[in-house]
Every structure is written in C-alpha cells, then in structure tokens.
Amino acid sequence: MEKRIIRNGLPPVLLAAVCCVCLGLLSGAGFRQNGTVSSADTVFAAGTGDDALLGSAAEELNLYAQSAVLMDADTGRILYAKNADTFRPMASTTKIMTCILALEMCDLDDTVTVSAYAAGQPKVHLGAPAGRTFRLEDLLYSLMLESHNDSAVMIAEHTAGDVKAFAEMMNEKAKELGCEDTWFITPNGLDASETYDDGSRRDHGTTAADLARIMAYCVWESPRREKFLEITRTQNYFFTDLEGKGSYSCRNHNQLLSLLSGAVSGKTGFTGGAGYCYVAAFEDGDERYTLALLGCGWPPNKSYKWKDARTLFDYGTRTYHTEDVFCLPRLPALRVMNGIPGNGDISEQAEVELTLNLAEEEKSLPALIRDGEKISLRVRIPQDIPAPVRKGEKVGEVSCLLGETLLRTYPVYAEEEVPKITWIWCVQHILRAFTFTGQ
C-alpha cells in the first residue's frame, strides 16, 4: 500500500472533532479561560516558646509621664506603651523635626537674617535684633542645645519662606514617616491652635508613638543623621553673628547624655500646656531604642523626665534581647489555570514552583524580643493564577510579624515560565496526536 503522512490537512469530520476537543480544553473546569485569582492568608508561628502567643504581659512601670513609649528603633516596634496614641502638645521636642528638615534641605553655610517676627519670639530665645545675620549651622546649635524659640523661626523662614510653609513641610515629612497622629503649626513647639477654612480646628501636638518614630528617623535613618548626632551630642558651643556684633554661648540641657552611658541624643521641652516633655535615643551594644515622654510633670517636678527615662532604659535592657528571627515557610506549587504543563501532558494540572529569590545577606532579621515571643508568618498567595506566567513574576508575599508589628515583607515570585493554552496550541497538540503513518 501507498505510504501516507497526514500533516496539514484533516477530513471535515475529523476537523470538527478537533474543534470540539479544543473547545473542551479551553472551557473545561480544569482549564478556565478566565481563571479567578482568590487570595488566601496562611498564618503560623515560628521561633521560641510553647505557643503562638507573645510572652508574659509587659510589667506595669510606675511612670510619671501621662504618655510614654519605648521603641525598638530598628523595627519601629513599641516595646512599652502608656497612652502611646493619645494626642498631646509636645513643646520643644518639636525642634527635632525643625532641625532634621533644615539639615536635609539647606546648606550649613547659608546666611540667615533675623526677621522682625523671629526677633519677637518669647523666651527662651537667642535675643538677636531684626536684621542681624547668622550662619545656619550656628543657629542649629542654638536650636538644639539652648532650645531658642527665635532661632527656630529664623530657620523655618530661611528654609521655606515663612513659618506656615515650613509647618506644611513638617506635616508632609511626618506623614512620610508614618506619623498619622502628629500635627505641626510652629517650628519651636510653643502651644498653638489653628482654625482652617473648613471650620475645623487643630492643635499643635503629637503622640508618644509618633514622636519616638521621628526620633528614630533623625538619629538612624536620615541622610543627615551624622550631623544631627554631632549637634545634639555637643556639650558646649560658642559662636558670633556674621557682623561680629554679638557673641553667643550654648550649653546642652540633655542631662541623660551624662547620666546614661548609652544615651546618644535627646531633646527636652516645656510649655504650660505640654508640661515637661522629652524624647531620646540610646544604645545598648547592638540594640537601639528611642523613648518619648509627654506630660511628664509640671513645675517644680522638672526631674521626673530623667527618672522616667532611666526606668524605660532599664526595662528595655533587662527585658529584651536581640535575636535573629529569620524564618520562612515552605511554599507550595501554585496551580496555573489554562497553563501548559511542563511535560506537555494536557490531562495534568499545570503548576508553577514559587521562590523568594533572596540573596544570602537578606536571610537575616534581627529584632528585639522577650523570652517566649514568636515570629508569625503571614503567607499571601492566590489559590490559583491564570496563564501565562512569566518567570520572576510577583505572585504573592510573605510577611514577618512580631506581635502586631510588621518586621519585613518578602515578595514571592514564579520560579519558571508557564505558557497559556491557546487555540493554535490545541490544534497543534491534537494534530501531533492524530498524525500517523500507514501502508
């Protein structure tokens, strides 16, 4: 018999059968053309301890402050809180934001001229008359060491043009840092309220949690952190105006620098509305903390803030230790709807392997923890995804949490490519199956 090879043509009956099979492949339950992606969360605990709960409840500290926070500066996790989210006036602790904005936006050698408005600021003030000029750097020492209110206004006007525009910059920066409960009106922290066009009224203030977060940024995250630390750690500073008409000396009033070996920075504050306030940063080996105290007594109880600060420092170093809590789940293969299986067998379900694609240096996650605490992993990947899938395509994420604090989020990627079943592929696939030779 004559040898025949069927390659590019099919009898009409067979062609109809091919079309039916293709239609079934594309619309069948196993291969939905419009696969629905439905997310799924899987949460489980890992680490030390017997169960997924945190360690024993934080002990009650006898603090004078109306609001207080001790924060892990590296993760932003709050280690101790007393009315942490209560909005209160913050007095001159405001000036840490004034300082860091000026450092990030201006040149230290800039010439700053005293305006009439700045010269009229109440004590504590530098006392320079309107028209006198200074180097910006000198005014930053005046701002942070002696807490001069007129220097704050000079800096704000130089940086943004006027105080109102500078306050807008302060509020924008606070939002960038995740501080949703902070509102700046002045650059010096004097008690202030403002009524806006819509009739709403807001006060100048923050929360202990937000203030600790801003301090962590100033000391360890800002591109100008080194200069911020240099200024705030200086004990004494002397300067003159550019005309040489006056001389000025500044002394650092942050007593914690001498009382506590681990203290690296801080800012005090007081107004009648705020009471004594304090924000600080300190280290204990590789462990980094910030603390914030609001409403920490009124005259004559000026020393309460130092007692509270030491209490929080002692609590942190006694209760917490640094541990590498890095751990990740085993990721299952992900179903790919309408995908071509790797072996080309259309009767099987297409799947794609998942990977986090982490470099070796990314496989570390140090955090301050108490004995018995555990890391929790929240895996968010869909139950299935539609084809086509590209290699390296992000398909989900794994979040690492300690308590309610998000420590880090890792993207989950497809490890390989999975093409989509198409009409052309179906026809070619069935043609290969029906191709035959005969005699």
Image (cartoon, rainbow, N blue to C red):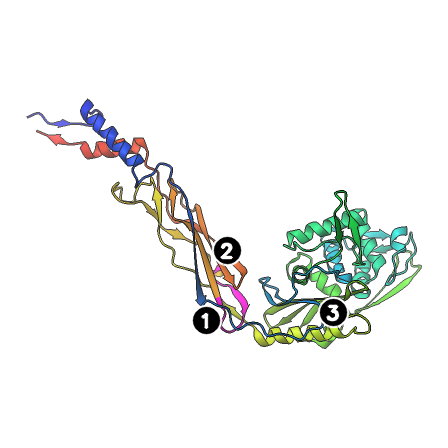
Residue position for label 1: 48
Quadrant (top left, top right, bottom left, bottom right) of the C terminus: top left
Residue position for label 2: 409
- Give the CA distance from mark 3 to mark 1: 37 Å
Task: Judge whether residue 154 is colored magenta.
Answer: no
Q: Are marks 2 and 3 in contact (CB under 8 Å)?
A: no
Q: Is residue 268 left or right of residue 49?
A: right
Q: Indicate the secondary structure of the residue bearing disc 1.
A: loop
- Give the CA distance from mark 2 to mark 1: 21 Å
Identity of the residue drawn at 53% across and 66% down: 366
- Give the CA distance from mark 2 to mark 3: 37 Å
- Magenta residues span 362-374
Q: Indicate the secondary structure of the residue bearing disc 3.
A: loop
Marker disc for residue 296: 3
Q: Is residue 133 left or right of residue 419?
A: right
Tell me the crowding category of disc 1: few under 14, some 14 to 19, or many 20 or more residues within 10 angstroms, Cα based. Answer: some
Q: Observer-nearest residue: 318 or 394? A: 318
Q: Amino acid at mark 2?
A: Thr
Image quadrant assignment for residue 262: bottom right
Question: Given the current orientation, which residue lies at the most extreme top position?
Answer: 12
Where 338 falls versus 241 (above or below)? Answer: above
Tell me the crowding category of disc 2: few under 14, some 14 to 19, or many 20 or more residues within 10 angstroms, Cα based. Answer: some
Marker disc for residue 251: none
Image quadrant assignment for residue 260: bottom right
Q: Is residue 115 visible?
A: no
Q: Position of residue 306 (x, y in %)?
A: 73, 74
Q: Which dot, 2 or 1, sits closer to the camera? A: 1
Q: Position of residue 242 (x, y in %)?
A: 88, 56
Image quadrant assignment for residue 427: top left
Q: Which dot, 3 or 1, sits closer to the camera? A: 3
Pointer 2 or 1: first along the chain: 1
Q: Which dot, 2 or 3, sits closer to the camera? A: 3
